[in-house]
């Protein structure tokens, strides 16, 4: 009998999508679920973190609270959405101090307030393994919804901000910096409104995995130029290669129609810069161009249940 | 420093509501959060179950899946809502078999299919303590939304179905029957459309606690007539008293305007019968009339973190 540890998160998720949405009506393969609602799409998503798998040992509760709010809002951002509200399900040991809970929820509130997202409710239950589930609800005009499918050969591949946050955590023990994810809501909305973006995803499990997910959803290939990737400053060559597969960036990875590329790439975005890092190809392989050679960019991002 | 085990779920939730919704804009004290969206209210709710606190030892995975879907839909029902979709966050040990997950999700799908609710997405992560979070999204016309506040002295107190499921589980080890909760969606919608219902809640933590919650939200008192309560058949006198405080009923407890009471109480509901069990009083106490004596109905339902 197969165990989940042998199957791995990606195949588990694929089989659940086949079961619950065999006709692809609800966009279960995207960053959020999509629900047709009048002139808009409603977007809804959930992401859970646990003490054992996601929370660094010395993390401050405020940073944990911020993080769980931010990574859910990041999924709304990846669809070009405007957040409507959030809920939180808090599973905590009975020995947790009231002060710790207060600080955790301060962090949640700080992130939600910054992005003007009301907290609409939640649930609190005892759980020996700290387990915090965020839920984000959002909306986006139907004709502006950013999906993972839609990239076409010749489109430009681009990314917001910088790549390599996870490496900083590992190397510098910069836990607070690592957890203070900035959901790219404003820039996601601007990209959606531009009509120039053909596909989009947030980089939660590493640049390589996210590029593969865009490739699978769009049925295209990608060429990524290593020299163009905007790594966080101070990484050495080995760290830059590791950073391709490291989770925790939460930047938007997206494709731009060639006729709009110059306009988008030259536009000033108040959140952060965007950078062209490659383009969409007409085969179905994902490759990395480095030192004038093209090598396969393997799908080596983090995978739950397998633990790698 | 206070621990959550000393504070208890009710005070924890009260302090979180004060923090996140000090002005009461988002109905955090209701069965679901409420979001103003065009001519409707959007309803969103989440409820988590864990192996340690909610799942009987010998429960079948199909029944667990059904249960987590049903208890979230029950919250939509308590608002008079129509469900739009559900999400599930599954926290499972890596040693879980693929077959167990398949059966769990079969149960989720069975409940969602029966009530025509699409599964819009979710999350899967490893967790040593099985932790399953359901999320339900719904909609209700603004002027039909059922809330906990709104009961007025002279209103009739009524309940759907029968009281005492939890006792059956305890006594007869009728686990499957206990977990096969029927969310009262249709009857909730009919009550909402009637314009006759002034307040409503689902009985998740026991009849006594739910009555106290209606009393607090509406700032009224209640008199409950023990002889009128529709207990599940076969309970002895001691079990009937225990059943007042036992969780797991998931029936709707609601109040009816006196001028509409006869109409509603005589109406045929296809889901299950409804029964008058008391009325709203103009003090703020909750009392139980039994054998011609009136005694306080204490708020003794289950409380998380305290474990009682």
Image (spheres, coloured by chain):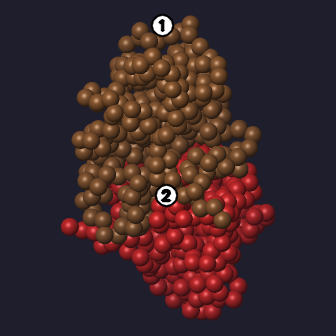
Chain colours: A red, B brown
Q: Chain of mark 2?
A: A
Side of B75 where B69 appears, left or right: left
Q: Residues within 10 Å of mark 2 (few under 14, many from 20)?
A: many
Residue B187, x across and y down, in percent: 43, 23
Residue A168 drawn at (x, y percent): 63, 83
Q: Residue B145 versus residue A26: which sits nearer the camera?
A: B145
Q: Residue at x 39, y 67 (%)?
A: B128
Would residue A48 be seen by someone viewing this image from the given angle? no
Dot 1 corresponds to which residue? B262
The residue positioned 54% from the left and 58% from the top of the image is B5
The quadrant in which the C terminus of chain A is found is bottom left
Give the structural element (helix, strand or loop) at label 2. strand
Give the x, y percent position of residue A138.
Answer: 61, 47
Q: Chain of mark 1?
A: B
Q: Please tell me whether mark 1 sits on a helix, a strand or a loop.
A: helix
Res B228 quadrant in image: top left
Question: What residue would you read off at disc 2?
Answer: A126
User: Does residue B281 lie above or below A205 as drawn?
Assistant: above
Residue B4: image quadrant is bottom right
* CA separation in Å, label 1 and label 2: 43 Å
Q: Residue furthest left?
A: A1
Identify whether B66 is placed above or below B115: below
From the viewer's perspective, tell me whether residue B59 is left or right of residue B187. left
In the displayed structure image, the side of residue B246 where residue B235 appears, left or right: left
Instruction: Examine the rendered structure and indicate whether residue B44 appears above or below residue B264.
Output: below
Residue A275, how many percent across, how many down? 68, 72
Q: Residue at x 71, y 50 (%)?
A: B19
Q: Quadrant of the N terminus of chain A?
A: bottom left
Query: Is residue B55 visible to us here?
Result: yes
* Residues marked 1 and 2 touching at CB (< 8 Å): no
């Amino acid at each position: 009998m197969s165990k989940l540890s042998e199957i791995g998160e990606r195949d588990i998720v694929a089989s659940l999508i086949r079961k619950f949405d065999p006709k692809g009506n609800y966009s279960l393969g995207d960053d959020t679920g999509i629900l047709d609602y009048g002139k808009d799409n409603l977007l809804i998503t959930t992401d859970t973190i646990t003490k054992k798998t996601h929370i660094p040992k010395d993390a401050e509760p405020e940073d944990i609270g911020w993080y769980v709010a931010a990574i859910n809002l990041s999924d709304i951002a990846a669809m070009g959405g405007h957040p409507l509200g959030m809920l939180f399900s808090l599973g905590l040991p009975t020995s947790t101090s009231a002060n710790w809970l207060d600080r955790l929820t301060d962090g949640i509130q700080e992130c939600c307030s910054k992005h003007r997202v009301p907290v609409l409710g939640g649930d609190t239950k005892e759980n020996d393994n700290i387990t915090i589930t965020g839920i984000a609800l959002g909306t986006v005009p139907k004709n502006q919804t950013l999906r993972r499918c839609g990239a076409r050969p010749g489109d430009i591949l681009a990314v917001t901000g910088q790549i390599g946050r996870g490496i900083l955590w590992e190397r510098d023990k910069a836990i607070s910096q690592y957890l203070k994810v900035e959901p790219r809501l404003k820039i996601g909305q601007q990209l959606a409104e531009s009509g120039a973006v053909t596909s989009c995803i947030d980089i939660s499990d590493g640049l390589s995995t996210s590029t593969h997910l865009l490739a699978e959803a769009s049925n295209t290939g990608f060429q990524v130029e290593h020299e163009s990737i905007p790594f966080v400053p101070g990484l050495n060559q080995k760290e830059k290669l590791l950073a391709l597969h490291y989770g925790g960036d939460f930047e938007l990875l997206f494709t731009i129609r060639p006729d709009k590329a110059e306009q988008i790439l030259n536009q000033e975005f108040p959140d952060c810069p965007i950078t062209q890092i490659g383009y969409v190809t007409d085969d179905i392989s994902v490759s990395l161009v480095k030192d004038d050679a093209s090598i396969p960019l393997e799908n080596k991002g983090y995978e739950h249940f397998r633990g790698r």
